[in-house]
Image (tube, rainbow, N blue to C red):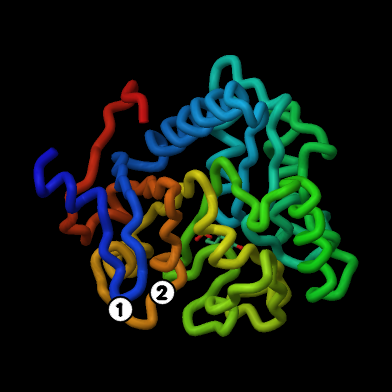
Amino acid sequence: MSLALLCGRKRCTGPGMAAASQRVLVFPSSSELGPALARFIAVRAQESCGSERARFTLGLSGGSLVSMLSRDLPAVPGLDCRKWLLGFCDERLVPFQDPESSYGLYKTSLLPKISVRESQVLAINPSLPVEEAAEDYATKLREAFPGEEIPVFDLLLLGMGPDGHTCSLFPEHPLLEESEKLVAGLKDSPKPPPQRVTLTVPVLNAARCVAFVTTGGSKAAVLKRVLEGKEAPALPAARVLPSPGELLWFLDESAAGSLTLSVERPTCAAAL
Ligand SMILES: O=C1O[C@H](COP(=O)(O)O)[C@@H](O)[C@H](O)[C@H]1O
C-alpha cells in the first residue's frame, strides 16, 4: 500500500489518542451517496446476521440522515430486516409526534417501508425527566446487549453539524468527557430542542463500525478541521475513533471541497 493511501486511511489524533482505521469516501452528490450508503448498510447487516451474533444492531442519528435513509434504504433489493435491532445515537426529548423527534420521523417515513416492528426499536421514553430518560435508555441498552460492559453496535450512523457536533455532543460541553455513563442527558443543547439524550463517546468508540454521513458546503470548513486539524481540545466529531472498529466517512463533493487528504471516489457499482 502506498504511503499516500496509508495516510488517507489512518488518522493521528494527538497525544494520548489512538489512531483509527479510517476510509473517506466521496460521492458526486447525495443522490449517489444515499444509495451507496444504503447498499453498505444492507451488506453489513447481511454479514452480521450471518455471523454467530445472528442479528444486526444499528444506531441511527437524526437530522438530514432521516430523509436520506427513508428514501434510499427501502430501495435496496431484497432487504431483510427481520433480525435488525435499531437504537438511537441521540434523541431529542420531545413526544414522538413532535417533528423534532427522530424516532417519530423514522416511525412514519422509514420503518413501515422496511417492515421493522416497534419491538425491534430501542427508543427513549420522552415522558420522563431528561436524566431519568437517559438512565432508562441505558437500562434498555444493557438488557439488549447482555454481558457487554459497553454495548458494541454493529454499525452506528452519525451526522455532524457545522459546529463539529455529533449525536448531542457539542463543542466544549462537559459531556464530552463523560466516561462512566453509557447515555447522558443534557438540558442545555445549543441547537434546539434543548433537552436531549445522547450516547457518550466511549459507546461510540466501542462500535464495530461507525459511519459519518456529511453532505453540503456548510460542513466543508469544519470537516477539514475534524479530519486534518490537530486541535486541542478536539471537536466532538474528531473524538470518534472506534478501536478496534472501523471508521468511514460518507461525503459529497461539496462537503469534501476543502480536504487535501487522500480520499476514495467509489464508482456506483463498487462494493464498499
Ligand atoms: O441535532 C442533531 O444534529 C446532528 C447533525 O444533523 P445534520 O442535519 O446536520 O445531519 C444529527 O446527527 C443528530 O442526530 C441530531 O440530533
Give the residue displayed 75% in from the left and 27% down from the top: 115
Residue 158 left/right relative to 13? right
Q: Is residue 37 left or right of residue 263?
A: right
Query: Does the CB distance between marks 2 and 1 fall below 8 Å?
Result: yes
**Residue 231, numbered circle:** 1
Q: From the image, which quarter does the C terminus lie in?
A: top left
In the image, 58 versus 241, the foreground residue is: 241
- Identify the amino acid type marked 1: Glu
118 is higher (above) or lower (below) than 44: below
> Which secondary structure, mark 2?
loop
**Location of residue 86 by image quarter:** top right
Name the amino acid, label 2. Answer: Leu
The residue sitting at 13% across, 38% down in the picture is: 1
Along the line of sight, the residue nearer the viewer: 231 or 255: 231
Dot 2, how many residues are within 10 Å of its Cα: few (below 14), some (14-19), or many (20+)?
A: many
Q: Which residue is mark 2?
A: 235
